[in-house]
Amino acid sequence: MANQISNGVNIKNTVNFIFEINQLKRQRHSGFQLAGIKEPDSVAEHVMRAAQIGYILAVMEGDANPEKVAAMILIHDNGEARIGDQHKVAARYFNTKEAEHKAFSEQLERLSRGVAEKWQKYFNEFENRNTKEGIIAKDADWLEAAFQAKEYMDIGFYTGRWIENVAKALETKSAKLLIEEMRRTKFTDWWQGLKKMTYKKLYK
């Protein structure tokens, strides 16, 4: 059967792309493995929370488009479906950014021109941080990693260095406020007071 086209979208290529990005569920954040964490969070899990953090940061900052920020974050790690997540030690020996850029650009060849052009623009803004949305999106990406590091630190892993590095890198006032409060908060605090005890005491 000939490949179908709908509104400029190549159906077969789109289906292949959707299958491909499922690899992000299988890609683990390799940096945390250096801290002894056997099964760290996946890239897909990171992206999901980072996109929501980005939306919140954009609203807090007040002069950026939160939907655009969230979209930028959702697609920024797509290249890792092909090259994997490379930690900073690996980056000493080869240009991981260059490889990820190439993979991302080749992935866009499977998508319609309208999608590809917008996503390439978003990717460039994220990497270059030359717009307010790009700055916020990168802050959200880093901040999510810091939150994840805090969770691991609270259960005994040596991941405080991630938090310190992120704190130094953050640009927006809102992100700096969030990370300072995060440092004072246990990752289990959110459910304190929410538990409803269901037992009925038999004897007083």
Image (cartoon, grey):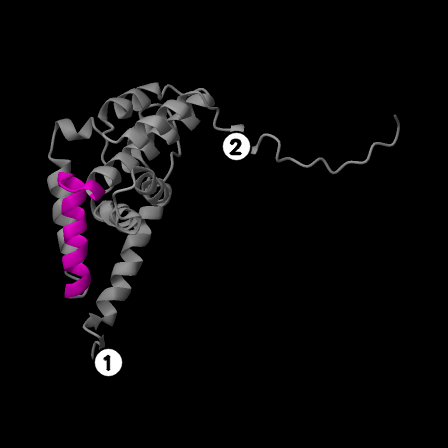
Q: Percent x, y for residue 176?
A: 31, 27
For mark 1, what is the residue? 1
Question: Looking at the picture, how far across and down is residue 30, in whole percent?
Answer: 29, 33
Which residue is farthest right? Answer: 203
In the visual, does 188 lie left or right of 54? right
Give the overall secondary structure of the magenta segment: helix
Q: Report the amino acid beneath label 2.
A: Trp
- Label 2 secondary element: helix
Residue lying at 16% horizontally and 49% vertically, measured from the top left: 103
Residue 87 lies, with reference to residue 71, above or below; the image says above
Q: Give the position of the C terminus as an image quadrant.
A: top right
Q: How far apart are labels 1 and 2 at the CA level?
A: 53 Å
Neighbor class of circle 1 (other Cα within 10 Å; few <14, some 14-19, many 20+) is few
Q: Are marks 1 and 2 in contact (CB under 8 Å)?
A: no
Q: Is residue 199 left or right of residue 24?
A: right
Q: Nearer the viewer, residue 64 or 48?
A: 64
Q: Quarter holding the N terminus?
A: bottom left
Q: Residue at x 25, y 60 (%)?
A: 17
Q: Which residue is nearer to you in this view: 37 or 146?
A: 146
Magenta highlight on residue 129: yes
Closest to the observer: 126 or 25?
126
Q: Position of residue 53 (x, y in %)?
A: 35, 40
State which tag comes first along the sequence, 1 or 2: 1
Task: Name the residue rendered at 21%, 28% in the picture.
Answer: 88
Q: Which residue is mark 2?
A: 190
**Highlighted magenta segment, given as a residue range:** 113-133
Query: Above or below — where is 194 with respect to 100?
Result: above
User: Does the image show residue 10?
Assistant: yes
What is the secondary structure assignment of the residue under circle 1?
A: loop
Q: Residues within 10 Å of mark 2 (few under 14, many from 20)?
A: few
In front of the other: label 1 or label 2? 2
